[in-house]
Image: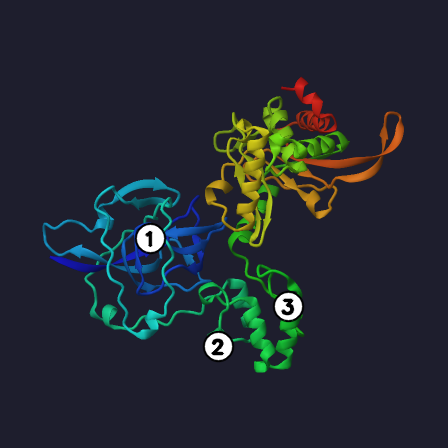
Amino acid sequence: MSATMIKEFRLPDLGEGLTESEIVAWKVAVGDTVTLNQIIAEVETAKAVVELPSPFAGVVAALHEQPGTVVEVGKPIVSFEIEGDDGAGGSAPAAETAKREPNLVGYGAVLEASGRPARRARTFASSAAAAAPVAAEPAAPVVAAEPAAPVVAAEPAAPVAAAAPPAERPRSTPPVRKLAKDLGVDLEAVTGSGVSGLITRDDVRNFVGGGDLPAAAQELAGAQALGGPETQPAGPAQGARETRIPIKGVRKFTAAAMVASAFTAPHVTEFLTIDVTPTMELLGRLKDSRAFAGYKLTPLTLVSKAVLIALRNHPTLNARWDEASQEIVQFNYVNLGIAAATPRGLTVPNIKDADRLSLRELSSALTELTDTARAGKTSPESLSGGTISITNIGVFGIDAGTPILNPGEAAILALGAVRKMPWEYQDEVALRQVMTLSLSFDHRLVDGEQGSRFLQDLGTMLADPGMVLAMV
């Protein structure tokens, strides 16, 4: 005989032993019918925003945490009402018998070719529940998460089915909620103009501009309107002498990693200023060629390729220090990290096996990496396993710097801005395009001579791209 039971889904470890994550947004509401592997939430780890798939097919019985809440791994975040079998010899629920395959967050359920869980009719305890947003469409390639702690099945309690679901919190993003808090706005009173009723910054500002708040708050909202995109933090309240911003998510992880790197690896930074006019001319020719039509080419593309070529003769820079075994581990592959400034802080996603890519493939990989990072969709897998990194500070108009090593890597290269400067050229002074390279390396693994020769070879290729033929 068929019956129902309540299953709790606990926040899983989303990679590399992370102990907590922040609930960014729920994609389902109480009363929604969900399918196996359907995306139910977005959570932010210390490295990235991750879509969380459902490990069960059933009806959402309760959401235990609100968006913006930091939750420890192993704590229940959502409960499902699923179909079971109360017979002693009955079969297990479909979600339990589904095939298990390893994935980023442990083990998730994948549907077999047959035996797809039957979808239950959506039920509501009140008209308010009927107005809840429709569940997000399932993402087929995503594998569901395995609960981090054993899931406990219980007989359904009568109040679960009879009681009206709790009122849903107004849909908004963390920056919007902070803006509303600073302005003293109750989001319950604001009507969202975004997708599915999402409350935006403009909705909050328009609410303030309507005269519902004191003049001081209205002035603050007007000042914050100049702050730019929604990802920027809200400005301080009028008259405030300081603003406190919680340290969490990507910034918390980055801070800890940089401190560990700075006080563990003995950093050395060397600089080389070169005439890159030939490289910039080559870049222009490639952009105009049919072979590269549709590809996004930048100085970073060519510098990345040059770095990959130079590493063939200088493998000591593509290595890590293994303190436990007292060994230097040299990698026979290159996972090229690219530092990316995102709304949530600095991340360094990497291109796996970048040394095997052609220039066109590398161009596509760099474009995908930056677009994904800016959208906040970089996966934890892409943020781990890097072997050497590049940071392009030239995009900010900076000429040189002393970059800190990404933990576990032997070197990082900073690209300065390309500037037109008077330069010696063919025994005369001419206006040339000049760039400064800044190379930081771990002096435990890389001697000064090794770092200098790598930087010299890199500069030689960028000053005269034809020299690549002599180095490969």
Instruction: Answer yes or no: is residue 306 visible.
Output: yes
Marks 2 & 3, CB-CB < 8 Å contact: no
Asked whether the beta carbons under mark 1 and mark 3 sit within 8 Å of each other, the answer is no
Q: Which quadrant would the N terminus be assigned to in this image?
A: bottom left
The mark nearer the N terminus, 1 or 3, is: 1
Give whichever of discs 2 and 3 has the lower sequence position: 2
Label 2 CA crowd tier, 10 Å (few <14, some 14–19, many 20+)? few
- Graded by Cα atoms within 10 Å as few (under 14), some (14 to 19) or many (20 or more), the crowding at tag 3 reads some
User: Which residue is disc 3 drawn over?
Assistant: 224
**Point 64% across, 29% down: residue:** 306
Q: Name the residue under label 1.
A: 54
Q: What residue type is labelled 2?
A: Ala
Please tell me the numbered disc located at residue 189.
2
Image coordinates for residue 378, horizontal then vertical, percent: 50, 46
Quick one: label 1, few (<14), some, or many (20+) residues within 10 Å?
A: many
* Residue located at (25% from left, 45% from top): 98
Q: Residue furthest right?
A: 428
Q: Which amino acid does label 1 sit on?
A: Ser
Q: Is mark 1 on a helix, strand or loop?
A: loop
